[in-house]
Amino acid sequence: MGITHPHASGRVKAFQRMSGVRLLGAHDESPLLRPFVDALGLEPRSKDEILTDADVHAVLVHPKSHAMADFAIEALEAGKAVLCEKPAGRGSADTARIVAAVNRTDGLFQVGYCWRFAPSIVKMQEVLASGRLGKVLQVRAHAGCSHNEAATAHMNQPGDIGGAMFVIACHLTIASCFTSACPMQSTPELPSFRWRSAPSPGKTPVARSSTTPTSW
């Protein structure tokens, strides 16, 4: 349910490559639904059709952030397992609602944090568990968006608590939790770039960067 998240098509294709899995349809109020289902060979269906179909055992929740919690909770209450794309809502209030629904329904729910299964993260956990590095007191992680990605509509949805820092940097936060325990404080540094002067045609522009720390 929901197809407007950038990862939606990739997840569908991954399931289509798996044996023993049938994709029974897709729902979204967006006009992008029709080209999405046409491109991937899916059937467009209403939300109620999906949730009341006994052959649907699991639901992929991949809309914009504002609809994630509502879709996930409705699917859980319908008895479906749920894989919800990150960040699973607009903020902690939405995720608290999902946790309450999981506890109420005893349902199966997971956020699509693909990094937690990455070989590098698995190896990191093995090294930390071995004690070779001693007790971890501080973690520094680095990541970045694609060029101009932070300015896209997906990263600037109304009601989101932090744009790219919320939608992208949540990967770093969850990875930090795997080092020992969830951090008491996160201090992201946001680099910004400004042109020193307007670049001349054929010339390489020179950028000046600055870093602004912000505590969560």
Image (cartoon, grey):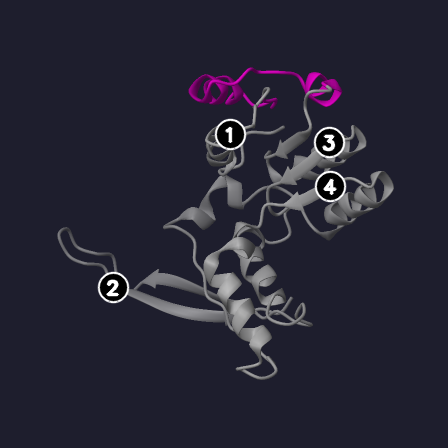
Q: Residue at x 69, y 50 (%)?
A: 91
Asked if disc 1 and disc 3 are in contact, CB closer than 8 Å, the reply is no
**Mark 2 touches mark 3? (CB < 8 Å):** no
The residue that mark 3 highlights is 80
Q: Position of residue 120 (x, y in %)?
A: 46, 62
Q: At x 60% / y 60%, what residue is drawn? A: 174
Name the image quarter holding residue 52: top right
As helix, strand or loop, the secondary structure at mark 1 comes to loop
Residue 48 seen in render: yes
Q: Tag 4: Cα neighbours inside 10 Å, few (<14), some, or many (≥20)?
A: some
Identify the residue under disc 1: 19
Q: Is residue 212 magenta?
A: no
Vertical placement of 128 versus 54: above or below? below
Q: Amino acid at mark 2?
A: Val
Q: Nearer the viewer, residue 130 or 69?
A: 130
User: In the figure, is residue 162 to the left or right of 109?
Assistant: left
Q: Pointer 1: residues within 10 angstroms few (<14), some, or many (20+)?
A: few
Asked if the residue at tag 1 contacts the one at tag 4, i.e. Cβ–Cβ closer than 8 Å, the answer is no
**Is 52 located above or below residue 152 in the figure?**
above
In the image, which is nearer the foreground, mark 4 or mark 2?
4
**Separation of residues labelled 3 and 4 (CA atoms):** 8 Å
Q: Earlier in the sequence, mark 3 or mark 4?
A: 3
In the rendered image, the vertical position of residue 24 relative to residue 179, given as above or below: above
Q: Earlier in the sequence, mark 4 or mark 1?
A: 1
* Mark toward the start of the polypeptide (4 vs 2): 4
Q: Could you give the CA–CA distance between mark 4 and mark 1, rounded to whole angstroms?
A: 21 Å
| Span shown in magenta | 26-53
Task: Tell me the residue that label 4 is attached to.
Answer: 108
Residue sitting at x 67%, y 31%: 58
Check disc 4 and give the amino acid type. Leu
